[in-house]
Image: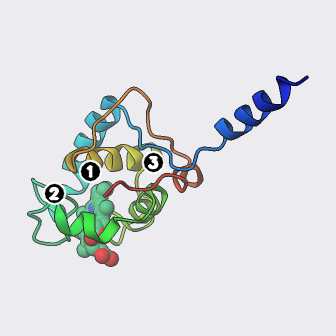
């Protein structure tokens, strides 16, 4: 009984995670790359920051703009607004892959765990910029 209480407290603490890490798989990055080329590159450019018709989605200005926001906010914006004027055009899976591709181009590495397609759960994850 004496041992049970600290164990319970530890278990409770470990079930709360205060800041989750971003995860996405290299398969998502690969899929996102093709989606980007087909649907996004025409405005955002071949290098994500050299588009004539859109703001940069790589580098300093993008990271300044989205720093302090959540992954859920970024994914929701992309889903609702992109391609510009034609939001919700792709499947959620494809939007999530495109976001994974964008993040990989901003220096975040792919891992084993894929990014969730559940936007609410992505709200718990801060962008690390
Ligand atoms: C017709 C041109 C066009 C296409 C195609 C397009 N975008 Fe955009 N995108 C824009 C414009 C313009 C903005 C800036 C909108 C704003 O700030 O409200 C933007 C902003 C963004 C942002 C946020 C950047 C910021 O400055 O806050 C992301 C992320 C994004 N686009 C992703 C995508 C993805 C992913 C696709 C492909 C599925 C895509 N876009 C296709 C024009 C486009």
Query: At x 76% / y 36%, what residue is drawn?
Result: 9
Query: At x 68% / y 40%, what residue is drawn?
Result: 13
Beta carbon of the mark 1 residue lies under 8 A of ligand 1: yes
Task: Label 1, secondary structure: give it.
Answer: helix
- How far apart are the two marked residues, 1 and 3, measured between alpha carbons? 17 Å
Query: Which quadrant would residue 77 be assigned to in this image?
Result: bottom left
Query: On residue 65, which mark appears?
Result: none
Task: Label 2, secondary structure: give it.
Answer: loop
Residue for badge 1: 102
Query: On residue 91, which mark appears?
Result: 3
Structural crowding at the residue carrying mark 2, measured as other residues with C-alpha within 10 Å and reported as few (<14), some (14–19) or many (≥20): many
Residue 54 picture location, percent across and down: 19, 71
Pick the quarter of the image with the C terminus.
Answer: bottom left
Residue 77 drawn above or below residue 41? below
Residue for badge 2: 48
- How far apart are the two marked residues, 3 and 2, measured between alpha carbons? 21 Å
* Towards the viewer: 67 or 42: 67
Structural crowding at the residue carrying mark 3, measured as other residues with C-alpha within 10 Å and reported as few (<14), some (14–19) or many (≥20): few
Q: Are marks 3 and 2 in contact (CB under 8 Å)?
A: no
- Residue 116 visible, this orientation: yes
Pick the quarter of the image with the N terminus.
Answer: top right
Which of pointers 3 and 2 lies earlier in the amino acid sequence? Answer: 2
Q: Do the residues labelled 1 and 3 touch (CB within 8 Å)?
A: no
Structural crowding at the residue carrying mark 1, measured as other residues with C-alpha within 10 Å and reported as few (<14), some (14–19) or many (≥20): some
- Residue 35 visible, this orientation: no
Residue 27 drawn above or below residue 45? above
Query: Which quadrant would residue 32 be assigned to in this image?
Result: top left
Task: Label 3, secondary structure: give it.
Answer: loop
Query: At x 42% / y 65%, what residue is drawn?
Result: 69
Q: Nearer the viewer's eye, disc 1 or disc 3?
A: 1
């Amino acid at each position: 009984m004496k041992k049970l209480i600290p164990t319970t407290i530890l278990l409770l603490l470990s079930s709360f995670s205060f800041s989750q890490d971003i995860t996405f798989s290299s398969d998502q990055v690969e899929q996102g790359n093709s989606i980007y080329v087909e649907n996004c590159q025409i405005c955002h450019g071949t290098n994500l920051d050299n588009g004539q018709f859109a703001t940069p989605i790589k580098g300093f200005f993008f990271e300044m703009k989205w720093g302090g926001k959540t992954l859920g906010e970024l994914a929701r914006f992309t889903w609702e607004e992109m391609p510009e004027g034609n939001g919700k055009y792709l499947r959620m899976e494809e939007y999530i892959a495109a976001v994974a591709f964008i993040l990989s181009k901003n220096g975040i590495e792919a891992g084993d765990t894929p990014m969730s397609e559940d936007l609410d759960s992505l709200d718990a994850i801060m962008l690390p910029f």
